[in-house]
Amino acid sequence: MRFGQIRFENKLTAALFEDGAARPIPGYTTVEMIRKSETEAIPLSELLQEMAIRHREPILPAIPISPVEVWACGCTYAPSASFRDGQHGNERGIYDYVLSSERPEIFFKGTARVCVGPGQPIGIRPDSKFTAPEPEFAVVLGRKGSIVGYTLANDVSAWDIERENPLYLPQSKIYSGCCALGPVIITPDELPDLREAHLECTITRGGVERFSGSTTVSNLCRPIEYLIEYLLRANPVPAGSVLLTGTGIIVPEDSALAPGDTVAIRMAQIGEFANPAAIVQ
């Protein structure tokens, strides 16, 4: 099942997506549907089918969920750790240490305030010269860390700020337009084998492709359930939150984002969404 949100009657509204069209669920957002499913002990798929209007609307997806919280994982793919450590010439730097340690890196990315959906601008900090997309497979969480569904994410990051000092990570990661989500959420039964999840990203400028990269979720160095378990330790993340699982696609500095660039992220099972880049204040 494919679900998410649309702009319907001037509101962000939960919807089912079928055959290229949307069946709205008036009066509810995605987060509200997740909470209703858990409160009433009705499977979400069943509830979505029951409450969606029968008439299909030719409306494109908006941000699939306005998350209560967004959390993100770092150094979950080997290329991510080696690229970061390579900037300092370390034989075994801090990022490689995190990659191989029992405890994963998990950090707060923000709330719905910093998130955008398909077609909306992602942010470039005015004090950054190397902002880059980080295409990621994302998990939508229900109560007590249950997996409600999967979506795609862009963990936009000001890499030069983090490079200057790892303690600047929050400024590198949390600012307006730093997280894009889209295009829809799929229920876990739509992707029973994560080894088949192939993620791609392109950056274009003026219609010319400047970067292209890909990875598979099977390259994750830790199981998703392991990341969720650590996230929830002494940290009861609310239902309707999203966990970004890290990036295995590394954008080099010569492809740093500039205003007007377009970042497209795609996975066959979920779809594709694109965002223009813009400087934010």
Image (cartoon, helix red, strand yellow):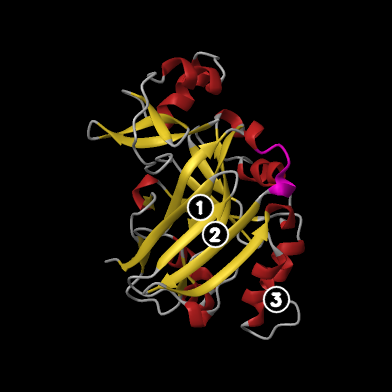
- The amino acid type of the residue labelled 3 equals Gly
State whether residue 39 is above or below residue 100. above
Mark closer to the observer (1, 3): 1
User: Does the CB distance between marks 2 and 1 fall below 8 Å?
Assistant: yes
Who comes first in sequence, dot 1 or dot 3? 3
User: Does the CB distance between marks 1 and 3 fall below 8 Å?
Assistant: no
Which quarter of the picture shows residue 75? bottom right
- The amino acid type of the residue labelled 2 equals Pro
* Residue 223 in view, yes or no: no
| Count of marks placed on residues | 3
Task: Name the element at disc 1.
Answer: strand
Task: Name the element at disc 3.
Answer: loop
The residue labelled by disc 3 is 93
State whether residue 257 is above or below residue 11. below
Is 181 magenta? The answer is: no
Return the x and y of residue 12 as percentages of the image width and height.
Answer: 31, 35
Between residues 228 and 120, which one lies in front from this camera angle? 120
Between residues 20 and 187, which one lies in front from this camera angle? 20
Who comes first in sequence, dot 2 or dot 1? 2
Return the x and y of residue 166 as percentages of the image width and height.
Answer: 54, 71
Please give the name of the residue rendered at 58% of the width and 33% of the height, measured from the top-left corner: 187
Please give the name of the residue rendered at 77% of the width and 63% of the height, measured from the top-left corner: 100
User: Does the CB distance between marks 2 and 3 fall below 8 Å?
Assistant: no
Mark seen at residue 135: 2
Task: Name the element at disc 2.
Answer: strand
Tell me the CA gap for discs 1 and 3: 27 Å
The residue labelled by disc 1 is 153
Which residues make up the magenta segment?
Answer: 191-196
Q: Residues within 10 Å of mark 2 (few under 14, many from 20)?
A: many
Which quarter of the picture shows residue 215? bottom right
